[in-house]
Amino acid sequence: MTDIKVLLIGVVALSLTACEPAQNRASEDESVKSAHMRAEMLNKMGSIEGRLNALDFMIEFLRRKSVEIDAVTHEYQSIDTNSGRFLIECDNVQPYLDGQKLQLRVGNPNLATYRGFKLKAKWGPRTPKWDSADALQNASRWDEWKRSLREKEIESTADLKPGVWNTVEIVLAPAKPDELGYIELSMTTDKIILYQDRTP
């Protein structure tokens, strides 16, 4: 009886050993398949996240609440504020201490004089290029780029006179010349001066 048991145990052990590679292969195949599915799911999630970020970014610019200005081409942009629309462009850039001094021209096409304003600036490297073949990488690059941006709020008591280009200087620091590939501005105005109508 003991010999039969030993024999049976040996046969079972051999059969298990013989089956083990096949089971391992099946297990490895399942792991690979699972990894592929996870990668595909992450890729889709990355694509959705990247597209949502890009959409949010584009909506802000379509609303004209914030605009991107170019320190090289000096082209003006139209910007909406809480109390009117203005034109804004970068006229000149010069190194200043550990940053860069920007000479802006703010055009006031309105009939009112605006006394004082606030500018919110974001700056950093150029926006990353979008790769249509790698959505996950897009989302990663986009998030990394957004985290690299610096921010500053500048308050001025200067008047923005009507019908003219008003010169405004701001300093973005710390910033090297090659760190101004992207400059975003938004603006708010508080006080409006209008002429009193004295007609009888």
Image: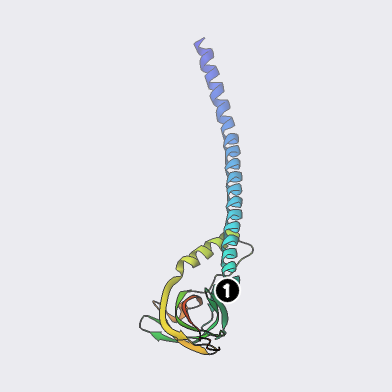
| Image color mode | rainbow
For residue 1, above or below residue 58: above
- Horizontal side, residue 120 vs residue 30: left or right: left
* Number of numbered discs: 1
Q: Residue at x 55, y 61 (%)?
A: 139
- From the top left corner, tell me how far across and down residue 20 is, in percent: 56, 33
Is residue 175 or residue 10 the one in the foreground?
175
Q: Residue furthest right?
A: 132
- From the top left corner, tell me how far across and down residue 84 is, in percent: 55, 78
- From the top left corner, tell me how far across and down residue 169 is, in percent: 43, 85
Q: Amino acid at mark 1?
A: Arg
Asked if residue 27 can be seen in this view, the reply is yes
For residue 199, above or below residue 29: below
Quadrant of res 85: bottom right
- From the top left corner, tell me how far across and down residue 32 is, in percent: 59, 45
In the picture, which quadrant includes the C terminus?
bottom right
Is residue 13 or residue 111 the one in the foreground?
111
Asked if residue 101 can be seen in this view, the reply is no
For residue 6, above or below residue 102: above
For residue 158, above or below residue 139: below
Q: Residue at x 48, y 78 (%)?
A: 180
Residue behind mark 1 = 64
Q: Secondary structure at mark 1?
A: loop
Q: Mark 1: few, some, or many residues within 10 Å (few <14, many ≥20)?
A: some
Q: Residue furthest front?
A: 200
Q: Residue furthest top?
A: 1
Is residue 155 or residue 12 the one in the foreground?
155
Q: Residue at x 59, y 44 (%)?
A: 34
Q: Residue at x 61, y 42 (%)?
A: 29
